[in-house]
Amino acid sequence: MPEHSPRALPEGDPFGADTLPYGVFSTPDAPEHRRIGVRYGAYVLDAAAVAAAHGSAYADLLDQPVLNPLMAAGRPVWQAVRAAIRGWLDDGQADDSFLPLDEVTLHLPFEVADYVDFYASEHHATNVGRIFRPDGDALTPNWKHLPIGYHGRAGTVVVSGTDILRPNGQRRTSEGPVFGPSTRLDIEAEVGFVVGTPAPSNTPVGLADFRTHVFGVCLVNDWSARDIQAWEYVPLGPFLGKSFATSVSAWITPLDAFDEARTAPPERTYPLLPYLDDSKAEPGGIDLRIEVTINGETVSRPPFASMYWTAAQQLAHMTVNGASLRTGDFFASGTVSGPEPDQLGCLLELTRGKGPWLEDGDVVTLTAWAPGPNGTRIGLGEVTGRVVPARTS
Ligand code: MN
């Protein structure tokens, strides 16, 4: 291949042929034409254009303004499309269809159906329990028996790069509740899972069926207003302290890209009920190494491999009561925190509840990679966002 080809990746680039995440983009000359692209190095492969040029059966599926039709097509199609894209990359016929990343606009890649956020890190739950309930047990009695979660707000899931307006709300003071801009705005470094194949009501998705239903993985920043959250959360859990914005990466990486990174979750303290018992299942953890930066400075490196509950257990739990699954359902891991002080996934833990918190103008960026085949790295697309001042009227 010619040396200037976009296919000639820099050494160690985590967006090579074994990664191939999907996104939705448009170009300045046709801003209305959103279509599916695949990230490769510092480029976007216009997958819709290449598929059309090859007369591919998947051309229509790729010339779509969201990933949902591809996600709904099911795992055999996901595998066939991924193989086709690799073929187009290999044979050089895609070389005219690369666009530099900085010349395209990236959009929210999928239409979010329902959004659930979990609480799957034992280190995070223990640290937060000590801060919020200093006189009680750090972990609630249910924590090691089921993956705790809550329903979030799908309509305020935003793509990486979207400014985050500081939320207004109620917070408690010694003089009683007051209303105004949150003074304790925080991040939560998380990993999200996007459902492709739906499931009807009353057909629980067992651990072994995880790959049938989950299309891909992305980084998530679950912005959290700790002052609003602390006042409102008893007894029904997070509400306005979380629902103002949740940022997701513009790139959804297929689950198959993480085959080399699968790892056993931590040893379980108690035996699990059969629908959650993964002691004989394939390893359900993923060895993703996350990095959190604020204004360009690294503040933490949370290890996703340390999560107690796996995404397969979360999906099994979400559906065990008979709840259906829809294409576009989205669930996030909960804050990823490891055992070390430099592995904590939010400021609440990093500052032991004392702050400092996010200031207007702060830019928070999450990146991550996992080990791939033959010593390569599999990158997760970044999720970034800038805090802007609260609405004042
Ligand atoms: Mn969260």
Image: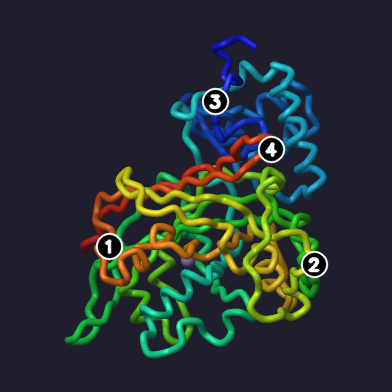
The residue type indicated by label 1 comes to Trp
Which of 228/296 is in front?
296
Of the residues under marks 3 and 1, which one precedes in the sequence? 3
Q: What mark, if any, has residue 280 been given in the picture?
A: 2
Q: Earlier in the sequence, mark 4 or mark 3?
A: 3
Left or right placement of residue 158 versus residue 271 in this view: left
Give the residue at mark 4.
373
- Nearest the eye: 194 or 7: 7
Residue that label 3 marks:
11
Locate residue 371: give its quadrant: top right
Tell me, yes or no, if residue 69 can be seen here.
no
Tag 1: Cα neighbours inside 10 Å, few (<14), some, or many (≥20)? many
Residue 6 seen in this snapshot: yes
Q: How is the model colour-coded?
A: rainbow
Q: Residue at x 54, y 31 (%)?
A: 13
- Placement of 161 over or under 181, stated as above or below: above
Amino acid at dot 2: Lys
- 111 versus 222 height, above or below: above
What amino acid type is highlighted by mark number 4? Answer: Pro
For marks 1 and 2, give the CA distance.
Answer: 43 Å
| Residue at disc 3, secondary structure | loop
Query: Residue 95, position in %: x, y?
Result: 63, 17
Reading the image, the residue beneath label 1 is: 357
Q: Looking at the image, do the residues carrying marks 1 and 2 touch, with CB atoms under 8 Å apart?
A: no
Q: CA distance from mark 2 to mark 4?
A: 24 Å
What is the quadrant of the C terminus in the image? bottom left
Single out the mark in the foreground, 3 or 1.
3
